[in-house]
Structure formats: C-alpha cells, structure tokens
Amino acid sequence: MKLTITILCFCLFALSHAQENPLGDFTFNKDIGNPKIAGEASYDEATQTYTIKGAGENIWGQRDEHRYVYNKISGDFVATANFEFEGYNEIHRKIGWMARSSDADNAMMVGGFLHGDGLFSGQWRERKGAEMQLGHDEVRAPKRFYQVIQLERRGNTFIVRAAHPGEPLQVISEKVLDQMPKEVLLGLVICSHDANTVETAKVWNVRIDQPMPMDYNPYQEGWIGSRMEIMNVFDGKRKVIHTKNDRFEAPNWMPDGKKLLFNMEGSLYTIPIVGGTPEKLNTGVADKLNNDHCISFDGKLLGISHNDGEGSNVFYLPLAGGEPKALTSQAPSYLHGWAPNNKEMVYVAQRGEGEPYDIYKKSIKGGKEVKLTNNKNLDHADGCEYSPEGKYIYYNAAKGGSAMQLWRMKPDGSKKEQLTFDEYHDWFPHISPDGKWIAFISFGPDIELNSHPPLKHVMLRLMPVSGGAPKVIAHLYGGQGTINVNSWSPDSKHIAFVSNSSK
C-alpha cells in the first residue's frame, strides 16, 4: 500500500511539474485553448533570451489559442520587453504581453500585441466569454523591426505602450477593467493566426517590475529590490548579473574590465561582471558613503563622497583601498569626476544656506576651490564630468526654470554650451572612454525640476559627443542610483546600471 501511495504521489508531482514547465524567470509555460499544433519555448541563460513557438487560430472573439509563458502576479506591475518575429509568414500573427484572469480560453484579458505586418495594438476582453475589443490608437513598424512592448497595471487601469527602437514609449491604449482580479496571469504570448502553422519569436530584456505607489518614500518606508545590469549600448541587449531585495547603487566599471564597483550600505563593493559574491572594499574610516564615487583616469585613485559628521564631503584614496584623504571640508560637497591629469576633482557644492548648487574644481594637492558656474534663482548645475582628453566638462543644468538639460563648458568655466533640447529632464552625462559617446538618464517632464528621485519610469539615452539627436537605449524603473556615476566599460561598448522592483 505504501508503494502504491508513493508512486501515485510521484505521478501527481510529475504531472503538476510538467504542466507548469518553468522557464527562465517564468513558472508556467503551456498552450492556452488547445491549439491544433502544440507550441514550445526555450531560454538561453547566457543571453537571457526567450524563444517562443506557437500556433493557434487567433487571440480574438470570445476565445483564444496561443502559447503562453507566464507567472501569477498580484497587484500593480510594469512588464517590458523587446520582441521580434523570425521569418516572414502570416501578417496577422501576434506576439506581445498579456494579462489574463485565468488559463481558460475565454478568460478576461488585456494585452499589447505586435502583428506580422508591423501593426501594433492594445486589446482586451472585459469579462469571461465576452467579445474582444480593440484600442483605437495603433502604430506600425517595418516587418523586421523589433518593438519594445510594455504592459502596466495601476489598480484596475491597464496601459499598453510601444516604442520603435531608439524612441520613447508611447501610449497605445488605456482601459479600466474593474472585474479583473487582483492576481492575474502575466506573461509572453505568441499566436500564429493559422491553426496549421507554428510561428517563432525572440524576446529579450524581459523585466517584470512591481512598482511602489507614486507617493512612496523609500528613504522613510524602506528600499525595494535592486538589479545590477550590464548592457551593450549598440544593440540594447541587457543582462542581469546580481540582485538583492534591498538597495545598492551606481556601478563604476573597474579599469581591468573584469569587475564593477558599487555602493551598498554606506560602503563600496566589487563584483565580477559575470556575477558572483560582492566583496567589500577597504575605505578606512569612511563608512557613510553615498552614490558619488569615481575612478581616476589612470586607474590608481578612487574619489568618494562621505558623510563625515558635518555632511557630505569629498575624499580620495588608492583604488586598491586604504585610508581616505579629504579634498573638501565644507559641506555639502558631492563628487562627480576626476580631471584627466589625475590631480584635480570636480564636484557640486552649496556654499551658503538657501544658495543654489554650483560646480567647483580643486587640486588634490591643496589650495582654493575654483567656482565654475554661477547659478541664481532656480538655476541648478550637477553631474559634472571631464571628457577623456580634458577639453570639456560635461554637466546637467536647468536655466531659468526650464527642463534639466545637458551642457558642457571649458575647464575654466567659459564657453558654456547647451547640448540637449527637449521636454525631458536629463541628468548625469557620462562620456565613453574613447570620447565618442554620451550616456545619460532622462526623467519624464512630470518630475520636479532639480530633482532626480528614485523609483520612476526613466530612460537611458545615448548621443554622439559630436552632436545629434539622442536615442533611447533602455526603458526601466529606477532613477536615483541608476547611473549617477560613469559606468562605461573600458572598451566603450557597454554600460552598467541599476534598476528596481519591489519583488
């Protein structure tokens, strides 16, 4: 009898496991609606890319047929990924994100889908067994273009967004579904729109973020989870190398190209770029560090901002570790960069209560600090960083109450020149080691001027140093701590950054 029960339990476990069929970060992987030809999916751990194959008559009318790779998600979420079909087949085939009330083929659902002919649309079924409805806004792209697709839930409002490569997301549809349960099935979907055909798509940069309420203050209520990511800036492909259900921030790429340096819990840590266990760096008595840390151009010295009891001040020490030496003694002073001569540092400081922040430089050999900007009223400057050849200092500034934009000036503070001109608040310009590119973070126009808060929808953008329109290289949930410091790889092909999610 015991043997019979054991065999029965094993069979039930095996059946349950086969039905779930976990894949990558998803728990469930199966067909919905019993398509004539079964679908399948695979995951490449090295590239963190999903390949999904599926048949199915349609995702339409009163029932659906498709391959579905999904999780059970409760509450608000922001799901974002890049999608691309393989080959040229049925024009009405679909790939995208979907949220369903259940795995029944006629379940209540909402989703954003890219079609085989480049059409992109949002659609939903308001209740079980109801007819599918279609959003009125649509975008199109050439057939071979991949698309960024995003599905967000805020309460019972579901927002579908899409973007062509290099462009900001735009809202395609927005729908309130009051009957949608708090817990839904959320995941990646493919449908061939032809019962006798299997279609294939690649999906990468898959991120499911669970954001906090708009008024959430992590400094008072506690931080949320962090991901360390590495991205190729030219093809936009990202890889998560480290996660923690708490706060870490602002990676620098170490000179040898093999490790990242980042701040966590008031200290600095290194981690291999392939992932692994972080190792603490010796910074002596400096144990209240923030996310302002940078490495000298010769790779020998490390600059830090540390709260020494008076507030934030700037210090430096050997990159290998040791006791720090003070550069500034008047707080608040926040480090941002080294001069290429490895003897001067640039930083942002407030000199006088109620005064705006300005950019200063000072020699590590001593002497007086030199004021490089003269901001008044609502003007503000931040994020100062030298170009590798020492010709310019790049920074972000808001002039006369306008949006925060990127600027540059000569090292003596002369010939100030504005570089970006749009509605976004652009922060922290970082120049690639080869001197050709600027990577920076952009906040939405709804963010308060002079503020770069955490836990927001943000973009990472890239533009040539020689000039030209910025292009979006990543959409993410983050902000403060994402890319405060220069995080370019030594070969000028990759950057590292931090994104956030509550789960």
Image (tube, grey):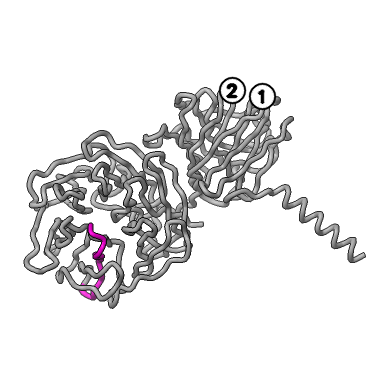
User: Which quadrant is home to the N terminus?
Assistant: bottom right
- Give how far across and how far down residue 125 sits, in percent: 60, 33
Confirm whether residue 183 shows in the render. Answer: no
Residue at image position (49%, 24%) is 143
Q: CA distance from mark 2 to mark 1?
A: 10 Å
Q: Which mark is residue 194?
A: 1
Confirm whether residue 146 shows in the render. Answer: yes
Q: Nearer the viewer, residue 282 or 125?
A: 282
Residue at image position (18%, 55%) is 340
Residue at image position (25%, 71%) is 307
Residue at image position (49%, 28%) is 120
Of circles 2 and 1, which is in front?
Answer: 2
Q: Secondary structure at mark 2?
A: loop
- Give how far across and how far down residue 218 sits, in percent: 39, 61
Pointer 2: what residue?
A: 89
Q: Amino acid at mark 2?
A: Asn
Q: Dot 2, crowdedness within 10 Å: few (<14), some or many (≥20)?
A: some
The magenta span reads 297-310
The answer to whether mark 2 and mark 1 are in CB contact below 8 A is yes
Q: Earlier in the sequence, mark 2 or mark 1?
A: 2
